């Protein structure tokens, strides 16, 4: 006769709850939240759909990675989950528990379950740090979306691409795969926001040459933009093939863009020229070109673009473009006309005090300006490139005082380049905040 371990009290409690299909949200609200993941797991596995629905409606965690528990597709259970989500979204904000923010339907292992429901009872009463781990899973979207649904996308002809309004596509260097995705992109007729991000770092190390085969793939992908009639927001981050192809992308745009974000890549002069020649950019509200090396380029096309968007542009990010005084001088007249400008960033550029002052003088009448980020003037560095904190403080304070004589800056800051020793910046924004090594 073998000895069997008797079920724990918590297990018995869970079983009792699962037997009661009439369990409602108010009862679940009273349960310690630590108990819910294990209970949910059992309810889902046992296909107790009423309980699943009630539990999702009362789910206290910001994330529900339910896909990890649904190895075998089950329509009834999925419907119960979605019905629970509907109920939760309709509930008023609960004072005790957070609302669900991410529904993760991907069929892949998720740490949430091993943290909360993997261990047997006594272990699952772990404290808040565990919850914080779960919260960390929450990405930046949580603040922007009422509910984010994450699902594996299986691209095949019967997929209803026309329902997709926002697409975030992470790519590596495989152009062939990109071209395979191209026809699906072209069918997303209602796409409004498209984020294309390269997941491989050090884009500048990899050469800019493309083979004939790659060229074909790139052109096939870009040609799909012709079909995106509703596109308003285009973000391309670290996309190396944009070099010498940006004019093709812009030439394919069918609707005026509100946001153009081209970041962390190298552009050629002809790419830059295309910015001033594309009428679909002339209503831009947001232009982000941070970490685009513009040092060796003629910025006249950017100047023309700024003149064209003077009545609409609200934010401009030219952080880490490594431009210098001569570039800035060219842009200042156009910048001074951008009457709607509220956010600008020029961190990590090489401006002398004289030209920085000129920029501030010429943009002093921009009454909507809210966040202003300027680089520390070159005069703040010594011959070895180290910042003189005294000079930095003095020059920045003087500039802010000058500006105050014309308008009240709201959120203005000057920053040094990133310190090579500690990886931080020293920032002057009404007060001085030094990088770690400058504090010693
Ligand atoms: Zn430092």
Image (cartoon, grey):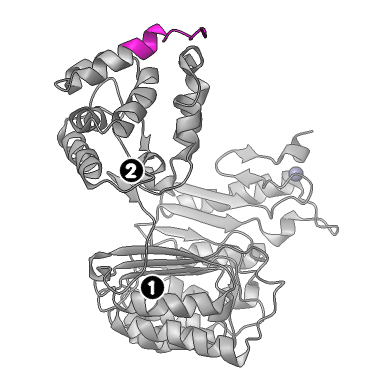
Q: CA distance from mark 2 to mark 1?
A: 45 Å
Nearer the observer, 147 or 182: 182
The 10 Å Cα crowd at callout 2, few under 14, some 14 to 19, many 20 or more, is: many
Q: Residue at x 38, y 26 (%)?
A: 37
Residue lying furthest right: 384
Q: Is residue 289 left or right of residue 376?
A: left
Q: Residue at x 50, y 49 (%)?
A: 412
Magenta span has 135?
no
The answer to whether residue 347 is seen in the rendering is yes
Q: Is residue 153 above or below residue 130?
A: below
Q: Quadrant of residue 31?
A: top left
- Whether ligand 1 has any atom under 8 Å from the Cβ at mark 2 is answered as no
Provide the major secondary structure of the magenta segment.
Answer: loop
Assign a secondary structure to mark 2. Answer: strand
Magenta span has 6?
yes
Residue lying furthest front: 1
Query: What number is the disc on residue 118?
Result: none
* Disc 2: which residue: 103
- Whether ligand 1 has any atom under 8 Å from the Cβ at mark 1 is answered as no
* Disc 1: which residue: 337
The magenta region covers 1-12
Q: Is residue 411 above or below residue 131?
A: below
In front of the other: label 2 or label 1?
Answer: 2
Assign a secondary structure to mark 1. Answer: loop
Give the quarter the ligand 1 occupies. Answer: top right
| Residue 385 place in picture, x, y as percent | 80, 57
Please identify the quadrant where the C terminus is shown.
top right
Q: Is residue 228 left or right of residue 114?
A: left
Q: Residue at x 62, y 83 (%)?
A: 297
| Residue 42 place in picture, x, y as percent | 34, 27
């Amino acid at each position: 006769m073998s000895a069997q371990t008797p079920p724990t009290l918590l297990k018995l409690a869970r079983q009792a709850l699962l037997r009661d299909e009439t369990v409602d949200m108010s009862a679940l609200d009273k349960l310690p939240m630590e108990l819910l993941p294990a209970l949910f797991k059992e309810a889902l596995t046992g296909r107790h759909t009423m309980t699943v629905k009630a539990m999702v409606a009362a789910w206290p965690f910001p994330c529900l990675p339910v896909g990890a528990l649904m190895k075998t597709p089950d329509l009834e259970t999925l419907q119960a989950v979605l019905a629970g989500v509907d109920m939760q979204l309709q509930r008023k904000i609960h004072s005790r528990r957070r609302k669900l923010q991410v529904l993760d339907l991907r069929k892949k292992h998720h740490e949430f379950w091993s943290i909360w429901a993997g261990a047997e009872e006594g272990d699952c009463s772990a404290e808040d740090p565990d919850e914080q781990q779960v919260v960390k899973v929450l990405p930046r979207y949580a603040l922007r979306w009422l509910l984010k649904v994450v699902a594996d996308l299986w691209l095949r002809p019967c997929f209803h691409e026309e329902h997709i309004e926002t697409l975030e596509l992470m790519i590596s260097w495989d152009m062939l795969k990109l071209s395979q995705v191209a026809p699906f992109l072209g069918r997303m007729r209602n796409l409004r926001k498209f984020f294309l991000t390269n997941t491989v770092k050090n884009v500048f190390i990899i050469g800019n040459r493309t083979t004939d085969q790659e060229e074909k793939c790139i052109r096939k992908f870009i040609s799909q933009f012709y079909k995106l009639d509703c596109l308003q927001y285009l973000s391309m981050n670290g996309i190396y093939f944009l070099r010498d192809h940006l004019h093709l992308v812009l030439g394919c745009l069918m609707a005026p863009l509100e946001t153009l974000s081209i970041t962390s890549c190298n552009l050629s002069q002809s790419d830059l020229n295309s910015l001033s020649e594309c009428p679909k950019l002339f209503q831009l509200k947001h232009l982000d070109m941070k970490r685009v090396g513009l040092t060796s380029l003629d910025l006249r096309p950017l100047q023309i673009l700024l003149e064209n968007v003077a009545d609409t542009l609200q934010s401009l990010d030219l952080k880490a473009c490594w431009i210098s005084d001569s570039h800035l001088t060219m842009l200042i007249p156009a910048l001074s006309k951008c009457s709607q400008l509220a956010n600008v960033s020029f961190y990590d550029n090489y401006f002398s005090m004289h030209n920085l002052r000129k920029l501030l003088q010429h943009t002093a009448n921009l009454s909507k300006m809210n966040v202003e980020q300027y680089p520390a003037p070159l005069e703040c560095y010594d011959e070895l490139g180290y910042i003189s904190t005294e000079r930095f403080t003095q020059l920045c304070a003087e500039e802010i005082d000058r500006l105050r004589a014309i308008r009240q800056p709201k959120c203005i800051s000057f920053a040094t380049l990133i310190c090579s020793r500690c990886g931080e910046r020293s920032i002057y924004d009404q007060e001085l905040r030094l990088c770690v090594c400058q504090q010693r």
